[in-house]
Image (tube, rainbow, N blue to C red):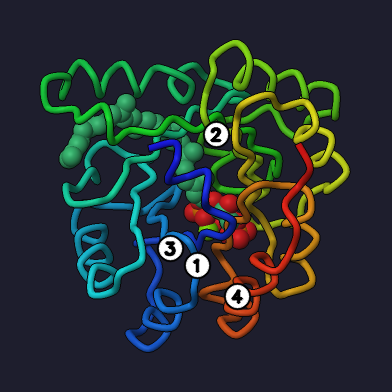
């Protein structure tokens, strides 16, 4: 499981709550990206998730579900990504919903298919920040400390610096990356073209591109080659 993710440099995140026509979806799936992640912080339902999964499954690209809502857990994905929002303002988003999920589905959970993600939500204006009442923005020293909780103390395989909807502070991202021991660093937020993608690729392990798919597909598609042609962040 971790081996699969450690090879990912570029991921497109598709939102079941947004419309994407067949030609655009085909371009995304054949773009050379390493994976398509399906998820969003609001409006995700069982029906719109099944629909998007079945459309992506016409292509060979790996497809994973990022669970944000228990009602929208659909079988048939390659992996299930489980966000743990480390700087959430309420424990529900750190472990509460997770415990409830296990209480409800414990015997049905395919543990080997679950991948926990230690999220740091860093754009206070994003829907995800509002939903989770995230303590954001964070000073670099706090971001580094949260990241080390995820990486060293909890041994999470992924630290996800989430700036959804906004370009991040790449100095902070680089700083966090340098503190990591074993976790893989996902960066997401505001990547819209080759230039922004190269900057993110230089300081992270995996670059996630979401909104640009819907807002500027040509720019979004440029990000694949840009990320894959960039040297990874140094360990
Ligand atoms: C095979 C099979 C069917 C197995 C099912 C077994 C099962 C039920 C497993 C569940 C196990 C488990 C522990 C589940 C956790 C359940 C859960 C609801 C946890 C909470 C997750 C969480 C913290 C969600 C908060 C929101 C969040 C971090 C979402 C991630 C996606 C994200 C940030 C999207 C960005 O959103 P976007 O809409 O783009 O934002 P903008 O509008 O700002 O752009
Ligand atoms: O939508 P954008 O801003 O590209 O962010 C990508 C992803 O990190 C969202 O969860
Ligand atoms: Mg979005």
Residue 33 badge:
1
Mark pair 1, 2: CA separation? 19 Å
Mark pair 3, 4: CA separation? 12 Å
Residue 143 badge:
none
Residue 220 badge:
4
Indicate which label's residue lies in the foreground, 2 or 3. Answer: 2
The answer to whether 2 appears left or right of 165 in the picture is left
Mark pair 2, 3: CA separation? 19 Å
Counting from the top left corner in percent of width and height, residue 16 is at 34, 62
**Residue 149, quarter of picture:** top right
Question: In the picture shown, does residue 187 fall above or below 143?
Answer: below
Q: Are marks 2 and 4 in contact (CB under 8 Å)?
A: no
Label 2 packing within 10 angstroms: few (<14), some (14-19), many (20+): many
Question: In the picture shown, does residue 143 fall above or below 43?
Answer: above
The answer to whether 162 appears left or right of 59 in the picture is right
Residue 14 badge:
3
Q: Earlier in the sequence, mark 1 or mark 3?
A: 3
Indicate which label's residue lies in the foreground, 2 or 4. Answer: 2
Q: Secondary structure at mark 2?
A: strand
Residue at screen point 20% across, 59% down:
50
Mark pair 2, 4: CA separation? 23 Å
Extreme residue toward the left, this view: 107
Label 3 packing within 10 angstroms: few (<14), some (14-19), many (20+): many
Indicate which label's residue lies in the foreground, 1 or 3. Answer: 1
The answer to whether 37 appears left or right of 182 in the picture is left
């Amino acid at each position: 499981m971790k081996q699969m993710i450690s090879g990912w440099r570029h991921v497109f995140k598709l939102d079941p709550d947004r419309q994407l026509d067949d030609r655009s979806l085909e371009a995304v799936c054949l773009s050379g990206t390493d994976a398509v992640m399906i998820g969003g912080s609001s409006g995700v339902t069982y029906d719109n998730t099944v629909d998007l999964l079945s459309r992506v499954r016409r292509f060979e690209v790996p497809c994973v579900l990022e669970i944000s809502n228990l009602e929208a857990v659909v079988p048939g994905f390659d992996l299930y990504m489980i966000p743990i929002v480390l700087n959430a303002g309420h424990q529900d988003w750190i472990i509460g919903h997770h415990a409830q999920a296990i209480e409800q589905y414990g015997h049905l959970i395919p543990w080997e298919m679950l991948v926990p993600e230690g999220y740091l939500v860093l754009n206070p204006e994003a829907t995800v920040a509002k939903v989770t009442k995230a303590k954001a923005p964070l000073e670099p020293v706090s971001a580094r400390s949260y990241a080390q909780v995820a990486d060293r103390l909890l041994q999470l395989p992924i630290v996800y610096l989430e700036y959804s909807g906004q370009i991040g502070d790449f100095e902070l991202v680089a700083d966090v990356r340098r503190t990591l021991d074993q976790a893989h660093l996902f960066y997401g937020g505001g990547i819209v073209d080759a230039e922004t993608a190269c900057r993110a690729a230089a300081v992270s392990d995996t670059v996630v591109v979401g909104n640009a798919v819907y807002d500027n597909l040509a720019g979004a598609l440029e990000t694949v080659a840009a990320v894959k042609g960039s040297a990874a962040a140094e360990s």
